Image (cartoon, coloured by chain):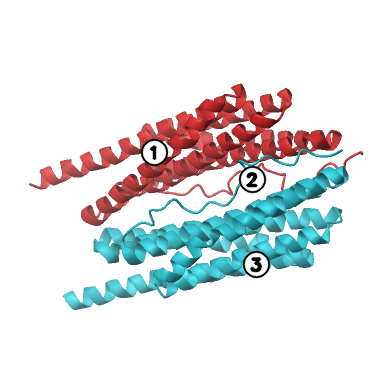
Chain colours: A cyan, B red
Amino acid sequence: LTEHIVKSFEEELEQLSMNVSKMGGLAEAQLQAAIDSFTRRDLQLADQTIHQDQVLDDLELLIEASAVQLIALRQPMALDLREAMSPIKIAADLERIGDLAKNISKRTLVMFDDYDTPARLVQGLTRMGKLALGQLKLVLDAYTSRDEALARKVWASDEEIDEMYNSVFRELLTYMMEDPRKIGVCTHLLFVAKNIERIGDHATNIAETVSYLVTGHRLIEERPKGDKTSTTPVPAGSN
Amino acid sequence: LTEHIVKSFEEELEQLSMNVSKMGGLAEAQLQAAIDSFTRRDLQLADQTIHQDQVLDDLELLIEASAVQLIALRQPMALDLREAMSPIKIAADLERIGDLAKNISKRTLVMFDDYDTPARLVQGLTRMGKLALGQLKLVLDAYTSRDEALARKVWASDEEIDEMYNSVFRELLTYMMEDPRKIGVCTHLLFVAKNIERIGDHATNIAETVSYLVTGHRLIEERPKGDKTSTTPVPAGSN
């Protein structure tokens, strides 16, 4: 009987873990679609991305409910407990990534409906989006293979996205000053950039969760923080 | 013996709940300080707010660890399970509120160090901040008294902050177009406004958690979403 219960617990953990991977795949697809619709000005794809976000919301609730039930009924300890707990954390981050992808798509609809968007700025944001997508893919791989070294690698390279954000931010501000008619569209681009930067933060959160899951220790160093835009002076403007 | 265990479980739940209230009080104080330092241009207070954020981070970890241990060791069901689980959710929202307050303070340091900030815009943001603070206070009261009606009231009035955000957003854009030299400082104000709007969202999340805690049912209607700035066209600009 004991063996049966042990087996079944492992099966339940595996089911939970598979649901997290499934949700991760969907979040990845949503982010990919948000970036593509933004880059290609594909309004239909943007619209689709907005409507599919509900699937991620539902999956988060499902994962949370089954994880909590597992913890309550099985009383796991140590690694088993971390295995049962980390899906709740990761699902919360994936749900937020889905929200942010949805918001990018919403802005895509407005921006390209009404305005000409400077191509060079769109390219910069596309690059930034692809970087965040790459981070998300890597950290989901790290979760699937319980690869702490890979998780730590993702965790350490969040700064790249932040640096790109800093440069896009400065470029956007300069652009607005040179042509105030573009302030409206540039403000949307500013928030798209900020959304991508936040998606990078959530990938970093997931990396921390995976590391803690595998090792049982928290990554103690102060998390890398490269977003300087809230603390560095902005260009003073020339006109 | 059974009675002893039951008593001790209730005590542990109470301890957990008190830690959430303590963390709530600190998050409130952090938000208050962030708004005050912003309004009064009090750089010392802003600096203090930034450094105290660590306390909230530590409390979140403590609450999460004790809640998980409680669930694993006591196997609570139904209301008891929700009582043990909700602190994890609420602590996560409070931690994010602390982060956003910290970010407001960081921007306060930069903005008032280098720039003249239009007084009328500061007033609008101060009002918005006070509204968010009021929402946070109410929802923490709702948690303390397990008052579902009050939680639902907070949940339903998130739209007020969103509407204020929409008007501040439009005002900021207009202001930038009229005086492009102010684009730098207005961009910071834009993000301060966005931070406050997000704090309102987290208060709404907490309201959902409290409602679920008390009733065992999720607030099913689509959550009120009044932030239209990602989907409405922005002023086209006149110069």
Asked whether the residues under the numbered discs 1 and 2 touch, taking CB atoms below 8 Å apart as contact, a structural biologist would say no
- Whether callout 1 and callout 3 share a subunit is answered no
At x 43%, y 35%, the residue is: B52
Which residue is nearer to you in this view: A154 or B151?
Answer: A154
In the rendered image, which residue does mark 1 sit on? B55
* Foreground residue among B20 and A146: A146
The residue beneath circle 2 is A229
Q: Which residue is identified by label 3?
A: A130
C-alpha gap between disc 1 and disc 2: 24 Å
Q: Tell which tag, 2 or 3, sits nearer the viewer.
A: 2
Which quadrant would the N terminus of chain A be assigned to in this image? bottom left
User: Residue A70 placed where, x, y %?
Assistant: 31, 63
CA gap between label 1 and label 3 equals: 35 Å
Residue A90, quarter of picture: bottom left
Tag 3's secondary structure?
helix
The residue under the point 42% across, 43% down is B90
Residue A80: image location, x then y, percent: 28, 66
Which residue is more in the foreground, A172 or B177? A172
The residue tagged with tag 2: helix, strand or loop? loop
- Chain ID of residue with mark 1: B
Residue B150 appears anywhere in the view: no
